[in-house]
Image: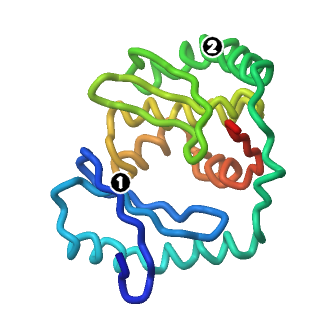
Amino acid sequence: MNVDGLEVQVVRKPIKNMYLRVKPPSGSVVISAPKRVRDGDIAAFVRARRAWIEANQSKIRANGPQDPTQATVWTDELRRQAAANINAALPSLLARWEPIVGKSPTHITLRAMTSRWGSCTPRTGRIRLNLQLGLMDERFLEYVLVHELTHLWERGHGAGFQRRMSVYLPNWKQLRRELSRQNVRYTND
């Protein structure tokens, strides 16, 4: 789809809300949209976020081209090490944060993800964490865990979500910025 000269890839999914991503290395724009949303509504969604899109595309350009050959390949040993690190940290993190947040996951899965640090299905209480977190400073694992636990209360990233995160983890925005600057990349190839 072309929105005012901006090429946008639209992926229709069985979801309730629209999501926007600006993806390296080219700064391509991808919208995940519910199946029934009209093209005009998608275009309006993009127009309302044009400044944010352009700012993120500029950041990607400023960081220069990413060389996919520099990505570390997941090996069985690296997966085991990352999973062991996360599994060792989770019991104490959950013991600390479940009483504060007031929610508990029904299940936590570890995955090698390429575009997210974590995800949550509030309806089932399932949380997925990126294996890369097991090879990074534990404060990033803690931030992502609190972020996903908060989604058990709040589905999106709106005012309610932000209010809760600021109560639970006052420095969450700084942690989010630091995490987004991490150049840790792993591929499944």
Residue occupying the point 27% across, 70% down: 42
* Rendered image quadrant of residue 43: bottom left
* Rendered image quadrant of residue 134: top right
Sequence-earlier tag: 2 or 1: 2
Is 104 on the left-hand or right-hand side of 138? left
Quadrant (top left/top right/bottom left/bottom right) for the C terminus: top right
Amino acid type, callout 1 = Ala
In this rendered view, identify the residue nearer to me: 153 or 12: 12
Is 111 on the left-hand or right-hand side of 86? left
Q: Is residue 149 above or below residue 51?
A: above
Looking at the image, the residue that sits furthest to the right is 70
Q: Is label 2 in contact with label 1 (beta carbons under 8 Å)?
A: no
Disc 2 crowd, CA 10 A, few/some/many (<14, 14-19, 20+): few
Residue occupying the point 47% across, 42% down: 165
Percent position (x, y) of residue 84? 72, 14
Determine which residue is flagged by label 1: 159
Looking at the image, the residue that sits furthest to the front is 189
* Rendered image quadrant of residue 39: bottom left
Percent position (x, y) of residue 115? 57, 48
Q: Is residue 168 above or below residue 115?
A: above
Residue 92 tag number = 2
